[in-house]
Image: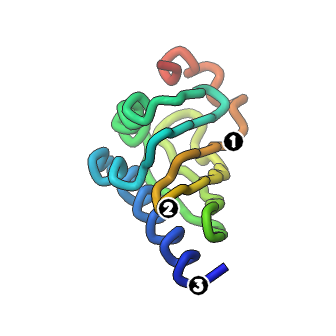
Amino acid sequence: MTATAQEQTRRTVRGYHEARFRGEVPAAAEHLGEPFRFQSPFIDSDDRTGHLATLPGFVSIVTGVELISELYGEAEATLVYDVHTATPVGVQRTAEHFRLADGKIVSILLVFDAAPWQSMKAHIEP
């Protein structure tokens, strides 16, 4: 693996991550490729447009994000972070794994404990 490839992965993933939590959908979209797949405890989607459409609602409940760890490879990355929310959930520890192709994110696997969100499930699912 070259340092250049690893740095490109970092720029792409961090660019997406930061744009998403600022609620900047067009900027986040710039980092996503086609085909695209998103998986989480509540949403499983092969549609990047649908995935991006959910971001404003999610960001509206986020009060802060604390990055804990970031690991980068040539075509994959993993971020671990705490999402502070204005919900009864409070702080949600989250791990997110990304796969990239041609410098774009083509797969996101979001991992978190969904149990605290069950009472709000009807408002989360598309």
Choose the circle earlier in sequence order: 3 or 1.
3
Question: Residue at label 1?
Answer: 112
Q: Residue at x 33, y 53 (%)?
A: 30
Choose the circle earlier in sequence order: 2 or 1.
2
Residue 91, how many percent across, how many down? 60, 47
Q: Between residues 23 and 27, which one lies in front from this camera angle?
A: 27
Residue 3 disc label: 3
Q: Residue at x 38, y 37 (%)?
A: 52
Dot 2 amino acid type: Val
Q: Quadrant of residue 121?
A: top right
Q: Are marks 2 and 1 in contact (CB under 8 Å)?
A: no
Residue found at the very far front of the displayed protein: 102
Question: Residue at label 2?
Answer: 13
Q: Between residues 37 and 97, which one lies in front from this camera angle?
A: 37
Residue 35 disc label: none
Q: In the rendered image of this protein, does residue 59 appear above or below residue 68?
A: above
Badge 1 marks a residue whose secondary structure is strand
